[in-house]
Amino acid sequence: MAPSLTPIRSHHVAVIGAGAAGLVAARELRREGHSVVVFERQKQVGGTWIYTDHTEPDPLSVDPTRSVVHSSVYGSLRTNLPRECMGYRDFPFVVRSGVSKSRDQRRFPSHGEVLAYLQDFAKEFAIEEMVRFETAVLKVAPAVEEGTGKWRIESTEKEKKELRDEIYDAVVVCNGHYIEPRLAEIPGNLISIDSSNWNSEKCDCDFVFWKLLGISSWPGKEMHSHNYRIPEPFKDQVVVLIGNSASADDISRDIARVAKEVHVACRSNAADTFIKRSGYSNLWMHSMIECVHQDGSLLFQNGKTISVDVIMHCTGYKYHFPFLETNGNVTVDDNRVGPLYKDVFPPEFAPWLSFVGIPWKVVPFPMFELQSKWIAGVLSGRIPLPSKEDMMIEIKTLYSTLEAAGIAKRYTHQMGITQFEYNNWLASQCGCPETEEWRKEMYFKTGARKRAHPETYRDEWEDHNLVSQAYQDFSLYP
Ligand code: FAD
């Protein structure tokens, strides 16, 4: 049984990661009176927004022994949300007066501006004094011998090399979810096999035998968008991107500036899809890939065959918690992290283990802020949680509802339109105001403009009234 919480108690809490989630988690936990240590394996705050030229040696990032490069950000990346909508609620992402001219003042700024904003946030709230930089968490496991509810954390500092073993009351996992790539399955083609190679003792029939070759028989280069940085290496090449994410959209246009041809294959496109992107002479949309051939060619489901140099998987990422040992109480199954009550607390360990940032298709930073406030308040005993049994019932009901609706497990944490209801629920638990109307509307309007004007939505917009409303609200936060 987990220890009972008596309000208001302060705990010793470990936060794993100093990205956008870990920073705000640390702030909220300290505000609530907890003592906090943030473990960060990089040498600065900002997580995925720390752009680097470096990529992983394995372009598909499948080798488990590879040295991980955390960031998935590419050189040309600008935010896909307007800054007013994207920022934490009580530290608005506004153009800051008096800061260096090198800052990007655009409404949809470059990745460097997001990093600078996160650095400003860390400075404003003195987060760095809680962070142990260049310290990787290797293991997080229940420390049963220390008393129920406690956690053992093994970490290693880059310079020191030896393991550090410590006990914490609670752990908040904020390790980011854009590191471990998901890959599309691409069949090789069918080839006939010389029947003389067949073992006739086992089969005496006189057929032509066929074998389905894997993608490994294809001589081109494969990579994941995690390892994409700049278009120049693709000059004069024929590139096929798989996916219909924001990254696939951005990267296909980026590469089309220098490549000979760019083709985007997408599972959700109808089988006969073959559309030239307007404004480009070398960029096409297709249905999914049917198969690849040993001669380097590739067949789409729409019947088109092309000769290809590079296939880039822009197919997203898997949740991955390599350090977490929970005896099977928290698992990742087809990208469902579970069981998690409200995407945050595993009932078995609540509230002593929690996760910030699991939902996707959301406005991340303000959601991280609310999840963190909730965790901090629950840990101190100020906000009650249902019993373990009731949390499990709610989770099981959610799973049954998804199954009945034919929604695959991997979409468990996709929110989209439901994120605002979720945020409002969190806000009600924490006693905070609900999501601002302008933020919601801005999110939907931006989405619609992105779909209608993917080329220009970052530089031309119509929601000026919402921007004014946002700035009126921001005046509340000096
Ligand atoms: P991260 O930023 O990934 O931070 C996790 C941190 O944990 C890292 O610093 C990492 O080093 C550390 N860590 C991990 N494992 C360990 C360990 N074992 N020990 C110690 N430290 C560890 N969001 C938007 O709001 N707007 C956008 O326009 C936008 N565009 C995006 C574009 C791309 C290409 C990507 C990949 C994401 C984009 N996002 C965008 C989403 C973005 O991921 C979130 O906004 C947010 O930055 C995620 O923060 P995080 O703290 O959860 O994860």
Image: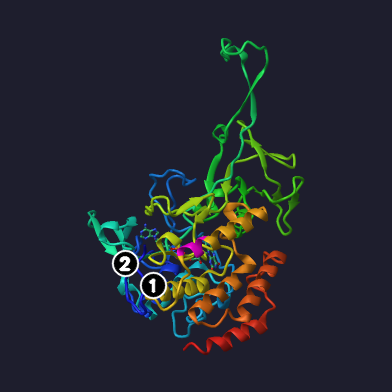
- Give the mark, 2 or 1, whose residue is nearer the N terminus: 2
Q: Position of residue 118 (x, y in %)?
A: 44, 73
The residue at the point 36 percent across, 61 percent down is 42
Instruction: Kindly state the secondary structure of the residue where label 1 is placed.
Output: helix
Q: Which mark is residue 457?
A: none
In the picture, measured across the screen, residue 372 lies left or right of residue 110, that is: left
Q: Which residue is mark 1?
A: 379
- Amino acid type, residue under disc 1 in the picture: Leu
Let me know if residue 391 is in the magenta part.
yes
- Amino acid type, residue under disc 2 in the picture: Asp
Res 117 seen here: no
Segment colored magenta:
388-392
Q: Is residue 419 above or below residue 237?
A: below
Q: Which mark is residue 169?
A: 2
Q: Is residue 301 above or below residue 131?
A: above
In the picture, measured across the screen, residue 281 lies left or right of residue 409, that is: right
